[in-house]
Image (cartoon, grey):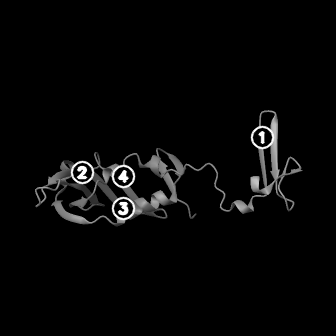
Amino acid sequence: EGAWYIYSDGRSYSAEPKAVSQILELLNNMSTESIVATKEDKWADYEVDEEQAVIVELFIGDDLTETVYVGKFGFKQIQSQDPHQQRKAKMTSYVRTGNDAMVYAVDGILRMSFQDIKYSLRNRSVFNCSDPADVTKLTISGGAEELVLDLTTPEWKLNGVSVDSSQT
């Protein structure tokens, strides 16, 4: 329908398109540094097994096209050749895809990007007006008072009285 949705715990939420684009870009730009395991019996060591991994499923329509298992991450200090420079940290994540037995080391900390992701991807907008110039009437009700800001005539009116357009 041209919109993104998050499905979690039997519920559906509207997703923020920019946040989804960032996640897709993150997945698309993963680059393999090395293969660290080639057999299923090593999956648990890298936390890419069904029980420990963060599982990301990618669909086209209703068709599952890829599953990515995001496992643990680690870092190591890299000593600089220059003794006056600080050590740098190398961040590595471990992933596998689909039914592939191989576990890959990739650059970065992926797991943190995917844990509790439904909260960061949710569209938090209550109201979205694509073009405020299209709005011609606004009614605000609360308690015993009601305000009607109206632009159905060439000038703004508040409860039927003309108002300064630079103030509305």
Give the distance between the C-alpha atoms of the residues marked 4 and 3, in whole angstroms.
9 Å
Element marked by disc 4:
helix
| Label 1: few (<14), some (14–19) or many (≥20) C-alpha neighbours in 10 Å | few
- Give the percent coordinates (x, y) of residue 135: 75, 58
Crowding near pointer 2: few (<14 within 10 Å), some, many (20+)? many
Instruction: Give, as a three-letter code, the residue at label 1.
Output: Ser
Foreground: 51 or 166?
166
Residue 141 is labelled as: 1
How far, Cα to Cα, is label 1 from label 3? 44 Å
Say what amino acid the circle numbered 2 marks: Phe
The percent position of residue 94, horizontal first and vertical second, equals: 24, 55
Residue 168 appears in the figure: no
Residue tagged by mark 4? 113
Instruction: Tell which circle, 1 or 3, labels the residue nearer the N-terminal end.
Output: 3
Q: Are marks 4 and 3 in contact (CB under 8 Å)?
A: yes
Specify few, some or many for label 3: CA neighbours under 10 Å numbering under 14, 14-19, or 20 or more: some
Q: Which mark is residue 120?
A: none
Q: Residue furthest front?
A: 84
Whole-number angstrom distance, CA of label 2 to CA of label 3: 16 Å
User: How far from the left and from the top, in percent, is residue 120?
Assistant: 45, 49
Q: Secondary structure at mark 2?
A: strand
| Residue 95, quarter of the rendered image | bottom left
**Measuring 30% from the left and 64% from the top, which residue is drawn there?**
30
Dots 4, 2 in contact, CB < 8 A: no
Discs 2, 1 touching: Cβ within 8 Å: no
Q: Mark 3 — residue?
A: 26
Horizontal and vertical percent position of residue 34: 18, 64
Question: Marks 4 and 1: CB-CB under 8 Å?
Answer: no
Name the residue at 24% across, 60% down: 106
Q: In the picture, residue 26 is in which quadrant?
A: bottom left
Amino acid type shown at disc 4: Ser
